[in-house]
Amino acid sequence: MKKWIAIAFITFIACSPKEQTPAEPISKYKWYGHEVTASAYNSVYWQTDSISPTVAAWGDTLKPGMKCIAVSRDLVESGLTHNTMVKIDTFPDTFYVKDKMHYRWRNRIDIYMGKDVKKAREWGKKQVMICYAVPLEIDTNNTTK
């Protein structure tokens, strides 16, 4: 129970917009928090497409060291689309959505770990909190909707 309270608090703090001073521009994104199951994957033929294991669903070429994730199709419908910024509670880096998972998966992300299969296996499968940025619409008067 204490673990979930701590995770909820961290997510609230991490996903909350920072207070803006009058000199700061209005944020272009709204951040949302969501709990997902996270696993890891590699760009090897037996985990992906045997013809082109480095080419992601939206056509991006994945290279070891890139900070990117694949998302289940239900999360795409929730706003986690191509190039969406994502923060994962166990990593200090910002990741970008570059790939989609098979239709059978729900509420999942796959963290890209290059060709390091050992590292991906050590990661395993975990419940994590993510925060993702959805762009705000800007009208012609330069105010957010």
Image: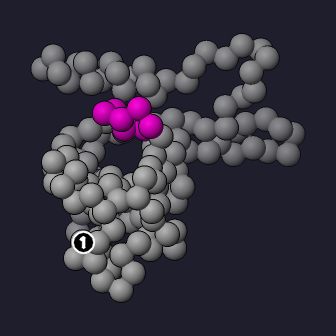
Q: Which colour scheme is used?
A: one colour
What amino acid type is highlighted by mark number 1?
Answer: Gln
Task: Single out the residue that lies furthest toward the bottom.
Answer: 51
Q: Relative to 62, is 38 above or below?
A: above
| Quadrant of res 54 | bottom left
| Magenta stretch, main secondary structure class | loop
Locate residue 97 relative to residue 104 in the image: left or right. Answer: right
Point 75% across, 27% down: residue: 25
Give the secondary structure at mark 1: loop
Point 43% across, 52% down: residue: 65
Point 55% across, 24% down: residue: 17
Point 67% across, 38% down: residue: 28
Does the image show residue 78? no
Does the image show residue 40? yes
Residue labelled with disc 1 = 47
Q: Relative to 110, is 92 above or below?
A: above
Q: Is residue 76 located in the magenta-colored stretch of the structure? A: no
**What span is colored magenta in the figure?**
87-93
Q: In which quarter of the image is the N terminus?
A: top left
